[in-house]
Amino acid sequence: MNVNPHARSGGHGGAIDPPTPEQLELIRATLERRLAALSQVEEPQGDAGALPVDEIETSPLDRATVRLLNDLTREAAGHHSAEMRQLRQALARLEDGTYGSCEECGQPIGASRLLARPEARLCIDCQTRAERK
C-alpha cells in the first residue's frame, strides 16, 4: 500500500518525466542567461537613504506622488533581488544534484514544468497547495 500522501494513482496526475541531460543543459543555459541579464540591469535602490525622487516642499498631491514613486522603486528593488536569488539557488541545486526534486514532497518536478519555470522549487501539486494558503 502506498503511504505517500502526495502520490496518486499514476503519480502526480500522470507520468512525471525528469529532464534529460540535454534539457538540464538547456535549463542551465537559460538560468545563466537570465541571471546575466538581470546583473546587467542597474538594480533599483531599495534603501530609504537613496530615494529616486526627492521630497520637496510642494502640494500634498505632489508629495503623495513622490511617496508612491519611491514605494514603487523599493518594491521593484525587492523583486529584482528576489529573482536573482531564485536563479542563483536553482543553479546551486543543479550543481549539488538536488535540482528537479520538489522541496516539499521530494517527488520529481517534471521536465515540462522545469523548462517553463527553470527556477521552480515545488512540483505542481505542492505549488498549488502553497498558492491556496
Image (cartoon, rainbow, N blue to C red):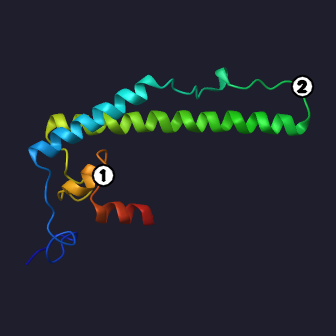
Q: Quadrant of the C terminus?
A: bottom left
Is residue 103 visible to us here? no
- Horizontal side of 69 relative to 29 (left or right) equals right
Q: Is 98 on the left-hand or right-hand side of 85?
A: left
Q: What whole-number distance in Å separates the C-alpha atoms at marks 1 and 2?
A: 48 Å
Residue 53, image x, y percentages: 73, 26
In the displayed structure, 32 sits above or below 99; it is above
Q: Amino acid at mark 1?
A: Ala
Counting labels gives 2
- Residue 96 spot, x, y in % from top left: 15, 36
Q: Residue at x 85, y 35 (%)?
A: 62
Mark nearer the N terminus (1 vs 2): 2
Residue denoted by label 2? 57
Secondary structure beneath dot 2 equals loop
Where is residue 33, by image quadrant?
A: top left
Q: Secondary structure at mark 1?
A: helix
- In the picture as drawn, the residue positioned furthest to the top comes out as 50
Tell me: 118 left or right of 95: right
Q: Which kind of residue does numbered mark 2 sit on?
A: Glu
Quarter of image, res 108: bottom left
From the viewer's side, name the closer residue of 18 and 51: 18
> Residue 67 location, x and y as percent?
75, 35
Judge whether 126 appears above or below 40 on screen.
below
Q: Quadrant of the N terminus?
A: bottom left
Q: Nearer the viewer, mark 1 or mark 2?
A: 1
Q: Residues within 10 Å of mark 2 (few under 14, many from 20)?
A: few
Specify the label residue 116 is tagged with: 1
Residue found at x 19% / y 49%: 100
Q: Is residue 57 above or below residue 11?
A: above
Q: Quadrant of residue 2?
A: bottom left
Tell me, for residue 42, which label it has, or none.
Answer: none
User: Is residue 25 visible to the viewer in this orientation of the structure?
Assistant: yes
